[in-house]
Amino acid sequence: EGEEGRWPPRLFFKVARVTCPVFVQGVSCQALLNFFSYMQPILLHGMLVKLSGGESERKEARFEIMLHALGIALSVMGMWIFAEYGWTLFVRADLRAQVVLSHMTYRKSLYLPGGSGYTVGDLQN
């Protein structure tokens, strides 16, 4: 009787406790991925502004142009790294949720009385 009217159910807390640390890491990777994707056009614009000046201005801004190019390269590498690592973390969070749900299903099936008419398959569906 205590489980019927309770919201959020105990299942929510168990899944959240298992997946939350990995999910927060994945969201952090996603935030860094977005940061790097926004930096690319900004750096490219700065580099194009420096390159569109006259010949004498370009010679003076050669170091700044190289820094913009290096920033674009690092931004692309950062995007790639955080996209791959973030995807791995989200898959890990999904696998943890699947494991905890399977564990709870089988644990619940151990408490079923013998003549109840339910099988483990009924619980999984």
Image: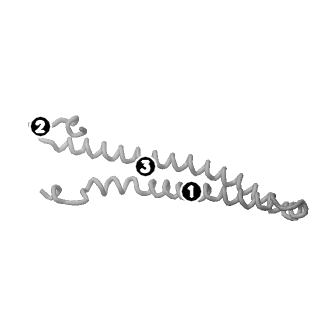
Q: Could you give the CA–CA distance between mark 3 and mark 2, rounded to whole angstroms?
A: 35 Å
Q: How many marks?
A: 3
Residue at 17 percent across and 44 percent down: it is 111
Which callout, 1 or 3, points at the residue further toward the start of the chain? 1
Cα–Cα gap, marks 2 and 1: 54 Å
> What type is the residue that disc 3 sits on?
Ala
Amino acid, disc 2: Gly
Using the rendered view, name the quadrant where residue 70 is placed. bottom right
Q: Position of residue 72 (x, y in %)?
A: 71, 54
Quadrant of the drawing holding the N terminus: bottom left
The secondary structure type at the circle numbered 2 is: loop
Please give the label number shown on residue 76.
Answer: none
- Which residue is labeled 2 in the image? 114
Q: Earlier in the sequence, mark 2 or mark 1?
A: 1
Which of the labelled discs sits on residue 34, or is there none?
Answer: 1
In the image, 15: left or right of 30? left
Badge 2 local density, few (<14 within 10 Å), some, or many (20+)?
Answer: few
Among the 4 quarters of the image, the one containing residue 125 = top left
Residue 66, compared with residue 122, is above or below; it is: below
Mark 1 and mark 3: span between their CA atoms? Answer: 20 Å
